[in-house]
Image: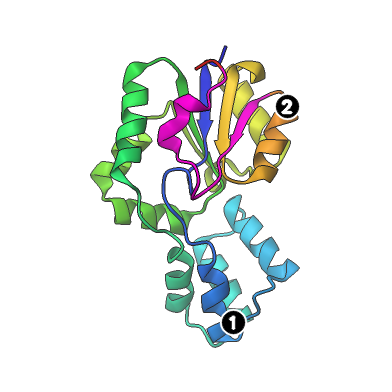
Amino acid sequence: MIQNIIFDFGDIFINLDKEIIYREIERFGGSIDLSPEILNINYQYEVGAISSHDFVSALTKIYPKATPEEIIRIWNGMLLDFPDERLAFIEQLAKEKKYRLFLLSNTNALHIEAVEKKMGTEKYLRFKNSFEQFYLSHEINLRKPNAEIFNFVLQQNGLKAEETFFIDDTKENTDAAEKLGVKCWNLLVGKEDIVHLNTKLPNA
């Protein structure tokens, strides 16, 4: 019986344009093939190992044609809209108190600051307060799909894997959680929507 639900954030609640990085960075002399160096910088930033300033500085060295402001604009440009029906959905689910609700997101300081600005502080806090715990990778220094992050959430909150349902749009992440016994929904962006959660819950 499912008692706990863990939600991803990007492309589950807020819509993303992940391809903007590839489209825009070519204009500044970058390659659409992200190098191991860039992937490592992103990883370090998402687990809070480097600051926003160091992250932007590192990218401006790789893309010298881009100013720090342009890097930030492109980086935050992947954040699109947060549909009101999804906010209403999670608030109603929280109100019902049928499940313990958690958010678990690979994200970073620049994105969270931009999300709050885009949504407005009042709406952002309404969203955040719908969850018992609001886990952001750069704050807890852990990142999906590493098993350590899932074990951290389960152990810190006394959750049983078999009673927990995890939703993420990245299959690598749901595959990792499933190996720990967590039931999962790998949501197909553009074809499925979190507001239809009840059709996917194992005990619905």
Mark 1, residue position: 63
135 within the magenta span: no
Residue at horizontal 56 percent and vertical 47 percent from the top: 106
Q: Name the element at disc 1.
A: loop
- Tell me: 94 left or right of 145: left
Q: Quadrant of residue 182?
A: top right
Mark 2, residue position: 180
Give the x, y percent position of residue 135.
51, 37
Give the x, y percent position of residue 154.
62, 24
Mark 2 surroundings: few (<14), some (14-19) or many (≥20) residues within 10 A: few
- Tell me: 178 left or right of 2: right
Q: What residue type is disc 1 on?
A: Tyr
Give the x, y percent position of residue 204.
49, 17
Q: Nearer the viewer, residue 2 or 73?
A: 2
Question: Relative to 95, is 109 above or below?
Answer: below
Q: Name the element at disc 2.
A: loop
Q: What residue type is disc 2 on?
A: Leu
Q: Nearer the viewer, residue 47 or 128?
A: 128
Q: Quadrant of residue 164?
A: top right
The mark that comes first in sequence, 1 or 2, is 1
What range is drawn magenta here?
Answer: 182-202
Residue at horizontal 43 percent and vertical 25 percent from the top: 132
Quadrant position of the N terminus in the picture: top right
196 within the magenta span: yes
Residue at horizontal 47 percent and vertical 54 percent from the top: 109
Residue at horizontal 53 percent and vertical 23 percent from the top: 201
Mark 1 surroundings: few (<14), some (14-19) or many (≥20) residues within 10 A: some
Q: Nearer the viewer, residue 147 or 92?
A: 92
